[in-house]
Image: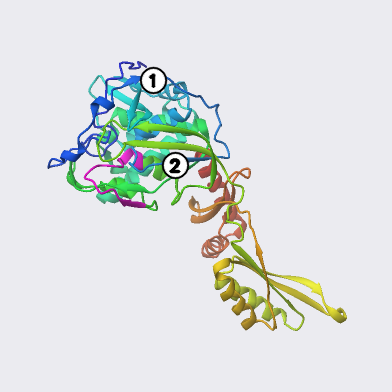
Amino acid sequence: MSHDHDHDHEHTDHDHAHPHPHDHAHPHDHAHPHDHAHPEHDAPRPFRAHRELPRGAGRGKVLYLDAPSGLAGDMIVAALVDLGVPTAAIETALSGLPLTGYALGWSLRTRHAIVATHFSVTEHAAQPQRTWAQIRKMLQTARLSEGVRALALRAFAHLAQAEARAHRVDVEDVHFHEVGAVDSIVDVVAAAAALDWLEADLRVSPLPMGRGLTQAAHGTLFLPAPATLECLIGHPTYDGEHPFEFVTPTGAALVGALGAPAPAWPRMTPEATGWGAGTANPSFRPNLLRAVLGAPEVSAEAQGSFVLLETNLDDASGELIAYCIERLLIEGAKDAWATPITMKKGRPAVVLSALAQAPDAGRLTVTMLRESTSLGVRTTAVDRVARPREMIEVETPYGAIPVKVAGGAFGPPQAKPELDACAARAVELGIPLREVILAAILAAAEVLRARGR
């Protein structure tokens, strides 16, 4: 593979499903004088890594992409290299692709006094358009590590599904336009290689959305582009206030497939930071992406944010206690349970307990007094350490099953299929429940392995 060290090249038509530049230099059908660049402050400088992180440096840690100016595939790669991913790790992965006619460029750019890494891909030969099927086959047969391959396939599959939804076609019929070009493929594989190197838990800030129209292979499109927005289903977004493409399809595909939304700054202790620069240099804000690697706080909840409710019952039947537990859970208790005890005069009894979030404690105290035979409820402020959780849906031979995954810096993730969904499938198909549970666990393990977790 040839590598461009001239540092004067910029992305053109980089990771888009439509023909405007990926690098945040976005043409619109009217002029915007406030979008002018400041080339005198943006001259490329020779690239030099200021740190290199060892492989697996992010294991058990949070990798946060802070994106007030949005993000693109090349900006993600640049920010992660600036963070400390060796360029050699990325170039080694890219050498396994059956692609020619392009060169890589690494340089430093200064934006509003912040020095950031810039990554570019320059094509030296004409490149064909590619379909999702062609790119999938390319990635499946390329000389890539299994971790890089899995991440790149997930990102492209996410984008293919978004394109299919946007254009109301079968996913196998999706034709990528600019997104099928060499530079977009390189961006996705390079980002996959960087994420595979770190092995961190990727989190993404709320993303700004641009305004206006743009010309694309499909005609005139609204910003954000339809496929971009489809890729970001479930991620917080807000008005970027400018006619500028803040988030590109490739950037959206990478964070939509491989990251999780972080509505606020994660609770962590920062250990390393990196900056990635887009090619455009608008005046209204620095076109930069910040990557932060940090150790998550062990406590996932704020101190004193939970209340333990307890009452002793020696005159309630088992049926009534079971009903009380059910009502407490329905009305918002985080957990509810009964513990056998012995009370005065040797009477067998139970402690009815519920864990409530502080704002719900008063309401649940009323529930406990109303539904049980209690004459009083004890309350104790408590702290809780909890693993972060997410719900994923996995495909099994018996259909789609929701699975709760507990992650964080507490060892390997735990996956637990939702019992009610498994039971419904077992009854519907006339098979043992344990078979459905096992299939869901195995499918979840494959999903987590592909994530590098």
In the rendered image, the vertical position of residue 106 relative to residue 357, given as above or below: above
Q: Of the numbered discs in the image, which one, if any, rests on residue 410? A: none
Q: Residue at x 41, y 37 (%)?
A: 290
Residue most extreme to the left: 30
Q: Report the magenta residues as a range.
A: 237-252
Query: Is any atom of residue 453 visible in this view?
Result: no
Along the line of sight, the residue nearer the viewer: 126 or 136: 126
Q: Residue at x 19, y 40 (%)?
A: 34
N-term-proximal mark, 1 vs 2: 1
Percent position of residue 232, x then y: 36, 49
Name the element at disc 2. helix
Question: Residue 47, labelled with which disc?
Answer: 1
Instruction: Please tell me in which quadrant of the rendered image residue 57 appears.
Output: top right
Residue 311 sits in which quadrant?
Answer: bottom right
Image quadrant holding the N terminus, namely: top left
Q: CA distance from mark 1 to mark 2?
A: 28 Å
Image spot of residue 413 (x, y percent): 59, 46
